Amino acid sequence: MPVMKEPKPLPSPLDYIPEQSIPYTVSSKDSWDTLALRSDVQSSGMSAYDLCFFNFKTRNPAEINWYLNHKVGCRHVTRDGLNYMFSNADKHTPNVPNPGVIYLPKHGTIAPVHETTDEPTLNAWLGIVGKAGTMFAVVGIETVTGAVVSLDDPTKWMAIGAAVNRVGLGWGASGGAAFVFISGVSSPQQLNGWQQADGDFNFAIGENWGKMAKSASKLKKIKPVIEAMAKISAKTPGGLKKLLKTEPDRYIDLVKAVKSVRDYRGLKGGEEPEVFMWDVPWLSGGVEASVFYGLQNFNAMWDGTN
C-alpha cells in the first residue's frame, strides 16, 4: 500500500482550485511525468513535481499520495507499491471532491510554483568499504574501512572506518567488499564515536552466500538504494570516485534512489546517524560459520583524495 501522510495543517483545502488553471480528467495513460510533457504545461515551465505543487501546494510524496487518494480518488498503485497512479476508474470514485480531476495551467501562464523553501538536505552518504572479520568460539572482531560520497554535494567525500566487536558462536574468517549507506549525517563529526548494535551472521564457503541471503531479507527498508548501487560497476572507493566523475548521471540516479527512500520509507534523515552495510556477494568470501551480536564503533574524517 502506498505510504501516505495527511498534512497537518493542510497546505490546500480539498476543494482548492489553482488560479489560472483548467480542469483535466486523468486516464490510465497519464502520469505526472507525461502531463509535464504537454505543450501547455511546458510553456509554463513546470516539472512533474511543480504540477503536484500547483495542485496540492506540497512537494512531499507521502502528502501527494494522500491528496491523490482523498481528493482525486486514485485507488490504483504503481508496481513498486509506493505511489498512487492515475486510472480511467478514478472519475467513478465516490465520496471524493474531484473524482478523476486534476488541474493544468492555462496555456501561456507562468504559474507560481516556486513559493516554497529550498528542499531539505538529504544528509546521506553512499560508498564502498572493505571488510575483514574473524570469529573464535564466542568472541570475534571485524574491521571496516572505505569512503562514501555526500548525496548533497558530489565533491564531498568522507573516509570512514569501524571496529565491530562480536559476541556469539562460530569459527573462521571472512572478508570482502561491501556497499554502505549512511543517513542522518552532514559531517564526519556526527559519525565519529557513533555506536550501532545489530544481530548478524556469516556463513561463508568461498563466496559469502550467507551474506547474500541476509542482504535480501534484512535491508528491505532501503531497497531502492540497494538496486541503484547494484548497477554500479566500481569495486573500490577509488573506482567509485572515478566512475562518478566520468559518468555524472550515475550520481543523479543514486540521489533519486536516496530521495525515494527518505520520502517513502521514513528514514531518520536528521535525527541521528543510521548505517546500513550489505556485502557484495561476488566480492566477499572466506571460510566462516558464525551467529553473533555486533557492536559497531565508527570513526570518520573528510577525504580529500582524488
Image: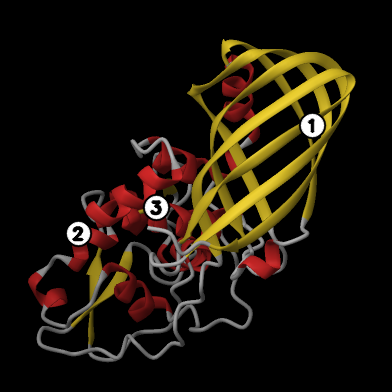
Q: Which residue is mark 3?
A: 254
Q: Looking at the image, is mark 1 or mark 2 nearer the viewer?
A: 1
Q: Is residue 146 above or below residue 245?
A: above
Visual colour scheme: secondary structure
Counting from the top left corner in percent of width and height, residue 272 is at: 72, 64
Q: Are marks 1 and 3 in contact (CB under 8 Å)?
A: no
Question: Residue at position x 20%, y 64% from top?
Answer: 35
Q: Is residue 87 visible?
A: no
**Between tags 1 and 3, which lies in front?**
1
Q: Residues within 10 Å of mark 2 (few under 14, many from 20)?
A: few
Marks 1 and 2, the one that precedes in the sequence: 2
* Mark 1 Cα-neighbour bin, 10 Å: few <14, some 14–19, many ≥20: some
The amino acid sitting under disc 2 is: Thr
**Residue at x-position 70% and y-position 18%:** 173
Of badges 3 and 2, nearer the viewer stands: 3
Contact check, label 3 and label 2, Cβ < 8 Å:
no
Judge from the rendering whether residue 100 lies leftward or rightward of residue 71; answer left or right: left
In the displayed structure, 142 sits above or below 16; it is above
> Which amino acid, mark 3?
Leu
Foreground residue among 87 and 265:
265
Q: Which residue is mark 1?
A: 141
Residue 149, given in percent of the width and then of the height, sits at 46, 58
- 136 vs 18, left or right, is right
Q: From the image, which quarter does the C terminus lie in?
A: bottom left
Check residue 159 in the rendering and tell me which mark sits there, or answer none: none
**Residue placed under numbered mark 2 in the picture:** 34
Whole-percent x, y for residue 172 in the image? 75, 14
Q: Is residue 165 left or right of residue 251?
A: right
Q: Name which quarter of the figure residue 111 lies in.
A: bottom left
Tag 1: residue type? Ile
